[in-house]
Structure formats: structure tokens, C-alpha cells
Amino acid sequence: MGTRLARNLIGSRFDIRPVEVSEAGQARLQADLGLTCLPMEEALEGAEVVVLAVPDTAIGKVASGIIDKLAPGTMVVVLDAAAPFAGHLPERADITYFVTHPCHPPIFNDETEMAAKKDHFGGIAAEVAKTIWAPVMRSHRVTVEQMAILEPGLSETVCASLLVVMSQALDECVKRGVPEQAARDFLLGHMNVLGAVIFKEVDGVFSDACNKAIEFGIPALMRDDWKNVFEPQEIAESIRRIT
């Protein structure tokens, strides 16, 4: 993640001072981007913005290790809501924490260049966020609690889980004799058109047969209380497991 953000920051109006603890990471930054890593104390001296591109489980330890070295007014950028939501960031009244996370490129887009189509990740607070996630179409301002509902709640607990189930369903079709490429093409094609209708990307309706399949399918696949994953205590428990 640090390499990806650094690539976008190169050539921007921001001067970057990378800090990397592993020799492999240092070598990668030098080889890929021509960046020389600095000792932490040197990098932090006079820094206006500090980006913590580290795993959720390390955020608390890393933040606690630098908190006393930051100048008043410094902005500390965290790339996921989990650690801030869980209370792992040390308190200090004269600095600002800013939590940002990419929406990623939307499944419905008008990219015509193959490189852009294949970019599945995507790429002053708002200006920092727009730079490190570039290119972006829109920037949204939400609370840490709302971001936690979006991730892990919406994007991982719900969306990623259901997509894994869809992949398992494809495997089941193959096990039952359907050619794998035919099953994959059929599923991904239907994901495109069904998603366009369901998310109102196009003005369309389903056939009676499809509506009846949905009416039967949802209770067959989903528990009646599945929306409880968005309850505050469930979000908090999910984040406790993550961090």
C-alpha cells in the first residue's frame, strides 16, 4: 500500500519522506520508484502530514511510537476505519486524525483504455486523499462510524461474503458437469446485466420468472436476521476481530 500511495505522491505538490522497516520494502521503493527511505525521526521532523500505510493490527503500536515526535498541528492519516473505531489511536489534542479509504473504481464505468479497465483497485485533507487514491471521481466526507458500517460491514462482511458464495456456486455448477468457461462467462455476464438493473444503472425490469426465482432464493440463501451485521455491537465485534 505504501508503494502504491508513494507512486501517486511522486510529482504532486507534496514532498514525501518514506519510512520502511523491512529491507525488502526499502529495496522495492528504491528499485520501483527511486525513493530512499529515511530514519523515522528524520522523516517526522517538520512533517505536516503523516500517512500510516501499515496493517490494522500495527496501527496502535506505530501511532503510539510516533505520537510524541509530531509537531503541533500535524495531520495523521489512517487508511482504514478499523483501528480508529476500536480506539487504538493515542489521544493528543493538538494533532488531527484523518481517516480515508478508497471506494475503488465502480463496476459500471466508461473506461475505454485497457489499462484503466484493468485497474480494479483504483487509484487540505481532501487534497491528500484525492492525491493518494488518484484518480478519483468523487470525494465523500463521512464519520469514522459511518466508514466502519461501509467497511467491514457493507464491503467485506456482506459483499465479499456473497461474492465468495457466488464463486462457490460457480464451482458447484462445474462439479455438476457444466464446462467451467461456460459457467464463468454465463455468471459474469449475468452479474453485469442483473447488477445494472438492481442498482438502477439502467431503467429495466426482470422477467416474472426471475422475480419468482429471487422471491424463493433470498429466504433459501439468507437468514431472516442477516441485517444484524450492521448493528453497532456487531460492527464493533467485527472490528475487534480485525484489530
Image: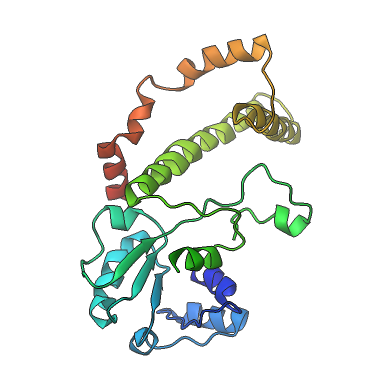
Q: Position of residue 189 (x, y in %)?
A: 72, 33
Tell me the residue at 53%/13% (across/down). Answer: 215
Q: Is residue 223 above or below residue 232?
A: above
Q: Residue at x 66, y 31 (%)?
A: 196
Pick the front one: 139 or 120:
139
Instruction: Please say which color scheme the image uses.
Output: rainbow
Up/down of 206 relative to 86, above or below: above
Q: The C terminus lies in which quarter of the figure?
A: bottom left
Q: Quadrant of residue 66?
A: bottom left
Q: Residue furthest front?
A: 124
Q: Position of residue 202 (x, y in %)?
A: 69, 30
Q: Nearer the viewer, residue 215 or 198?
A: 198
| Image spot of residue 199 (x, y percent) | 59, 31
Compared to residue 67, the image places residue 166 above or below, namely: above
Q: Residue at x 61, y 54 (%)?
A: 137
Position of residue 2 relative to residue 240, above or below, is below
x then y, percent, for residue 122:
60, 57
Quadrant housing residue 4: bottom right
Count how many numbered circles sit on residues in the image. 0
